[in-house]
Amino acid sequence: MIARAVELDTVGFAVFVKNVGRMYGLAEVLRLVQTVHHRGDRVDRSVVALMVADGLCREGRIEDASHSLEEMRLRGWKPDFVAYRVVSEAFKAAGRVEEEGRILKQKRKLGVAPRKEDYREFVLALLSRRQIGEAKEIAEAIVLGDFPIDDDVLNELICSVSDIDVDAALMFCKFMVGKETFPSSAMLIRLCESLCKNGKGDDMWEFFRVLLDKGYCRNVRDYHLMVSFLGKAGKVREAYDVLKEVKKKRLEPDISSYNSLMEALCRNNLLRPAKKLWDEMFTSGCSPNLQTYNILITKFAEINESEQAQQLFDRMFQKGVSPDGTTYTSVINMLCQEKKYEQSVEIFTKCVMQDPELASSVLTVFMLALCKQGNYKGALGVISCAPSNVQSVNSHVILLKCLTDVGEVDLAIEHIKSIRGNFSSCFQIVINELMASLSTSASLQSVTRLISYLNSQGIIHDVGPWMELIADGYA
């Protein structure tokens, strides 16, 4: 680049010489600096001096870092207060008090004040070029030294750094709050997602307490954000404490906060507190919505509390809350597991009456649930009685595949006849998808028999390739 007279900029050159210093030491850095001395008009020399010193310190080359301050200054690349502090802190961490004091004296005598605008442009440029690690390290030097940095730069930093170093992102956030400035909602959400992902619920709660003490929460939405993420992190007691804080402020918790806490309680198998929260919702005048019902019904179904799940399901209708696919599939799966087939059919009938399109997707799950319990005749009865606008290709294919897998070829053949007569518009699609699924069947004998039947009826032709495919699958 230098030989071709390509103009350098601060980001490119600073990152390059920092890495050179970490790998090869100060001598190579000084050679590069001397080479570009008269060609680096666009390069911020104080920023480069900091990057060199910081890189050397991070690599454990403290002596080189110390010498770099003087050598860079003599060459016209004046280190600022940030660079001197980085080196003094490195000596302090190494227990070398005398050298630390010497660097601090040099800082007072020779250092120049950092220019906030220069660092602003530099950090934002690093972030825009996806040099997140470099941006994090330079920001650490600024923040730990309590040097000025703009709030919007911190917000950008925290959002980007959260993905690679959540501890550093949290440190930046605490620095911001310490300056009596609150993070943006988008930034806080990004940070909390990373804290949850990294199992740092305790750190998140500690930070939330700081925000609460500082008066961050001004409306229900702000409190909900805390309740939601505390619930995700498994901090249910703390989430409940925040909910109580909402009531103390004479604000009315919205249904989203209750749902977040309810979901956390159920996820952690805390059913008694979940039921208590349910009662509390009503006394607070907050009516449960579809999500609330689904959270509890799904949990009750999971632990085979069919009576509780059924009561909630019935209550939904009484309160005018329409179940969705999650509600129906949870209840139907539960009833099939308990072999309460008549009740499961009643539930499915309600689904058909409510919304045929919804019932079509639920029917597929119903077929799987019945077949899993070995109730193949029951499955045939349900799908045969379902209205034509509810039956789907997928539900027929699943049932036929299950019948073939367990060797119930006669039942499969009878159902194929029924589809041909009553579902003729989609018959060939069902057959094509069934054929595509048979190569994974567990019963070669059943597959062979079914394909032979289909061929004899002229439904499929040229069965040779099918037989070869099946043979390959069982080789």
Image (tube, grey):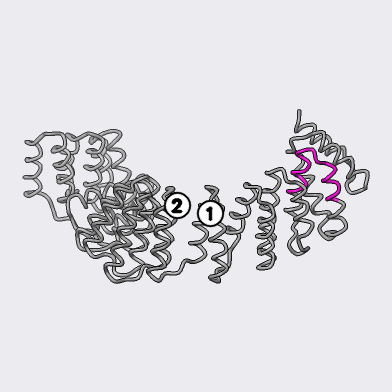
Q: Is residue 13 visible?
A: no
Give the answer, above or below, for where 344 lies relative to 24: below
Circle 2/circle 1 CB separation < 8 Å: yes
Question: What label does residue 298 carry, if any?
Answer: 1
Residue 266, numbered circle = 2
Can you tell which quarter of the image residue 364 is in?
A: bottom right
Residue depicted at x 89% and y 49%: 459
- The front one of 265 and 358 is 265
Nearer to the camera, 84 or 465: 465
Tell me the element at label 2.
helix
Question: In the shown orientation, is residue 97 left or right of residue 180?
Answer: left
Q: Alpha-carbon neighbours of circle 1 within 10 Å: few (<14), some, or many (≥20)? A: many
**Span of residues in magenta:** 398-416
Rendered location of residue 104, percent (x, y):
9, 45
* Picture mark count: 2
Label 2 crowd bin: few (<14), some (14–19), many (20+), radius 10 Å? some
